Image (tube, rainbow, N blue to C red):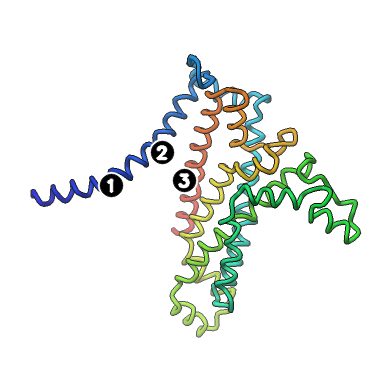
Amino acid sequence: MKKLYSNKLTIFLFILPALLLFVVILVAPIFLSGYYSLFKWNGFGKKVFLGLSNYKELFTSNSIGFIRALGNSLLLAAFSVGIQLPISLGLALLLGKGRKGERGFLSIYFMPVLISTVVIGQLWLKIYNPEYGVLNVFLRSIGLEKLTQIWLGNKATALGAAFVPVLWQYVGYHMLLMYAGIKSVPTEYREAAMIDGAREGQINRYIVLPYIKPILKISTIFAVTGSLKSFDLIYVLTNGGPLHATEVPSTLMINMLFLRNRYGMGSTIAFLLIILCFFFALIIGLIFREKED
């Protein structure tokens, strides 16, 4: 009994540093954001208790624009699930066949994930430049000068132009997750299906996809929650402009915290983002569980 107690104490001491970091870095800020969201506060002076007034203002005030910002994030989430993940899955299935040079292709596709988001933002700013950008230069070279745009400065095109780099950057990330899952499918399953006369598409549909369903669930959760939290690349490209056309909750939160000195409202947005991420992760988990059943 004494030895068992000693083992448990040793395990607890080893876990304690990681547990403290988890509480201080993740759990405590969540509760603090929820607490500050109940106050009117500029971050320095006296806090004035408002209850749920910040939440009410967030959804009813047109001057804040949270509904529009949230709509932009949900649209990005839809594009991530409907465009980004299918492209990643297609690439993973192609490379999972054991094609020549697959390691090289994996490195190339994964490279955008490794590059700093600020660097990627600057790269795409050059691509979208209305004067010397690759996109407009290409359109002019094939006689489509009428289609040239100030891509990030035009309210009609800015949102789509900002979404393209976000979707492009993480295709390789999801592809690598799915590729690892595809490679883990037992070869016996494939061989048995081929003996029975199954074609490649049927093998992918009835063997590979069901087998990697847990990874597809994780990728879907990452894609949706990542879209809700999207900030850095959009901030570098447009800073939420023009005229708030590309505003997302994270850029709006920064605006409230550091430009308008509304710390309570910024905390409200942060806390709602956390709740939304947990909510969508739970819904996606339930959807995949129902499909498995």
Label 3 CA crowd tier, 10 Å (few <14, some 14–19, many 20+):
few
Label 1 CA crowd tier, 10 Å (few <14, some 14–19, many 20+):
few
- Residue at the spot of label 3: 282
Give the Cα distance between marks 1 and 2.
16 Å
Q: Earlier in the sequence, mark 1 or mark 3?
A: 1
Indicate which disc residue 194 carries.
Answer: none
Which one is in front in this view, the residue at disc 1 or the one at disc 3?
A: 1
Task: Locate residue 263, reporting x and y percent.
Answer: 54, 24
Quadrant showing the C terminus? bottom left
Measuring 71% from the left and 34% from the top, which residue is drawn there?
Answer: 244
Indicate which disc residue 25 carries.
Answer: 2
Looking at the picture, which amino acid does disc 3 mark?
A: Leu
Nearest the viewer among 133 and 38 is 133
Nearest the viewer among 260 and 33 is 260
Indicate which disc residue 15 carries.
Answer: 1
Looking at the picture, which amino acid does disc 2 mark?
A: Ile
Residue farthest along the left direction in this orientation: 1
Give the Cα distance between marks 1 and 3.
27 Å
Task: Locate residue 126, reporting x and y percent.
Answer: 74, 50
Task: Locate residue 47, reporting x and y percent.
Answer: 48, 16
Measuring 50% from the left and 15% from the top, which residue is drawn there?
Answer: 45
Measuring 48% from the left and 22% from the top, which residue is drawn there?
Answer: 38
Nearest the viewer among 29 and 292 is 29
Left or right, residue 149 beside residue 54: right
Nearest the viewer among 228 and 118 is 118
Give the Cα distance between marks 2 and 3.
22 Å
Q: Earlier in the sequence, mark 2 or mark 3?
A: 2
Count of numbered circles on the image: 3
